[in-house]
Image: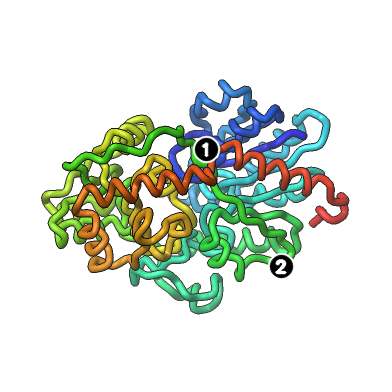
Amino acid sequence: MRVVILADFAQPSGGAQMVAIESAVALRRLGLPVTYIQGVASRADPRLREAGVEVVSLDLADVWSLPAARAAAAGIWNRLAARRLAAALANLPPGPAVLHLHQWTRSLSPAVLPVLSRSPHPLVLTLHDYFAACPNGVYYRFDRGEPCGLVPLSASCLLAPCDPRSGRHKAVRVVRTAATRACLRGARFDVIHVSDRGRDTVAPFLPAGLTQHRIDNPVAAERGPPAQIASDSRIAYLGRLTREKGADLVAAAGRAAGMPALFVGEGPAEAEIRRLDPDSTLMGWRSRAEVDALLRGGAVRAVVAPSRWYETGPLTVYESLAAGIPVIASARSGAAEKVRHGRTGFVVEPDVEAVASAFAALRDPRVAREMGREAARRYWEAPLDPATHAGRLVALYDAMLARPATARAA
């Protein structure tokens, strides 16, 4: 069995790409032949070739690098992506294969879905977000700063000024979502949800013909002793600095609790963070090795992820628990499933008062150390390591291949 993984990028610049890469490497280590097809012409993560993964680039442009009109057209229906993907699939070695799509909104577009559905090979989609149903992909009202409650593509949805950029961007995303829905309708794809929250949010809006599964994302964490949390450690926010992810809440809570936070990342909320708490520290983006050193080196007392949107499953939460760092997680986030309130961290509503209360509970570093030890113990009892993830994927792939071909046809 060959596994063909498809994503817009082969670089770990986001959660979806990270999962696609980790799973490709882990599957290859199990001895399976793996082909990784990336849409955008860019340098692939070297771990792929080091593991023996065949990397194929469709040499497409990232839609965000194109002029507005071309970007809109390519984002809605990229004919070039469809043609090049069809050629790449035709060049696969003979034999059984499974196609696994992780991301398609930055270059591939919905145009690749008919190509994949016409393939003789079964297809599974991992839903890292809500683009399969929701125009803005996060099922969130950016105009109101709250989760959405509308039916995607309903009249109310079409009229809602919910896009984070503009009404014109919303219009393009609506057309793209309609095209996606048309391609999914009547199909026999399988779908993987990465958290209960993600499944419960998007499942009601998916076509009835899709077979749905629940598999955790892989976490590439090395086992070791729990982090030795220092007395002068700080609560840290790791990721893009945006309001929907609650970065501003962290700054406001830190100031309210008298515990300035540490921010690792960049984003549009940077100025607001500096205004809300001038004593906070913004480090910008850091490499994966540098972040791991922060977690393991004792500088981080806890990691806070107070998302306002129904975030499917941020990897930073799982990585922190694995390192023995307690987590403050939003009750709206899929990652909250892995946090034991009061034992390995806190599950809170994404508001300043609740987040500040969690900060205050961690004022004594001894409390953080105890929670961190418990977090590590619980995590490593059932680790989300890439090998375990790959094993679950193989079981799913085998089941998909065992179905009659007629049952897989659209």
Tell me residue 359's x, y (percent).
Answer: 23, 57
Using the image, tell me which numbered label, if any, was put on residue 9.
1
- Give 206 or 340, whichever is nearer the viewer: 340
At mark 1, the secondary structure is loop
Tell me residue 366's x, y (percent).
Answer: 24, 48
Residue occupying image coordinates x 71% and y 67%: 208
Residue occupying image coordinates x 41% and y 33%: 224
Residue occupying image coordinates x 26% and y 52%: 367
Query: What amino acid does circle 1 point to?
Result: Phe
Q: Quadrant of residue 21?
A: top right
- Viewed as shown, does residue 363 lie left or right of 33? left
Q: Which numbered disc flags the more N-terminal residue, 1 or 2?
A: 1
Q: Is residue 115 visible?
A: no
Query: What amino acid does circle 2 point to?
Result: Ala
Tell me residue 378's x, y (percent).
Answer: 46, 48
On-image quarter of the N terminus: top right
How dense is the environment of label 2, judged by Cα within 10 Å: few (below 14), some, or many (20 and up)? some
Q: Is residue 282 visible?
A: yes
- Viewed as shown, does residue 216 lie left or right of 15? right
Residue occupying image coordinates x 35% and y 60%: 342
- Give 48 or 261, whichever is nearer the viewer: 261
Report the residue marked by disc 2.
208
